[in-house]
Image (spheres, grey):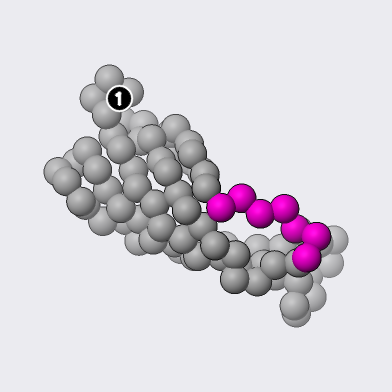
Amino acid sequence: GSAELNFPIYQNMLRGVVFADAGDVENDVRFGTIRTSVGAGIRFTLPFLGPAPFAIDLGYPLVRNRHDETQLISFSLGLTR
């Protein structure tokens, strides 16, 4: 699951986001296997790219397994992360 708060910073071109994510990648869901993270990011909507935003997110894992591969910075183009 995911929750995101999206807010304007400068007109419609630059927006900020804060988010929280939770999920599981195990075969069976058990208490203690759900990973959680929080983060913040920005969204640029540039006229030459159309309505698709360019996103930069910084995330921090709150609950993780010692074998998990973590990604602290994420870049994306479009409506999905």
Q: Give residue 77's position: percent from left, percent from top.
A: 44, 32
Q: Residue at x 71, y 63 (%)?
A: 24
Residue sitting farthest toward the left: 11
Residue sitting farthest toward the bottom: 31
Above/below status of 57 relative to 18: above
Q: Residue 66 occupies which quadrant of the picture? A: bottom right
Q: Residue at x 22, y 38 (%)?
A: 13
Q: Is mark 1 on a helix, strand or loop?
A: loop
Q: Give residue 19's position: percent from left, percent from top.
A: 44, 61
Q: Give residue 61's position: percent from left, percent from top.
A: 60, 65
Q: Is residue 4 visible?
A: no
The residue wearing badge 1 is 50
Residue sitting farthest toward the right: 27
Left or right: 44 as drawn, with respect to 70? left
Total numbered labels? 1
Would residue 42 be counted in the magenta stretch? no
Left or right: 79 as drawn, with respect to 37? left
Residue sitting farthest toward the top: 48
Kind of residue at disc 1: Gly
Would residue 70 be counted in the magenta stretch? yes
Please report the bounds of the magenta region as a residue range.
66-72
Q: Residue 54 occupies which quadrant of the picture? A: top left
Q: Give residue 27's position: percent from left, percent from top.
A: 85, 61
Instruction: Classify the position of the N terminus by image quarter.
Output: bottom right
Q: Can residue 8 be seen in this view?
A: yes
Q: Is the magenta stretch mostly helix, strand or loop?
A: loop
Above/below status of 2 relative to 79: below
Left or right: 24 as drawn, with respect to 12? right
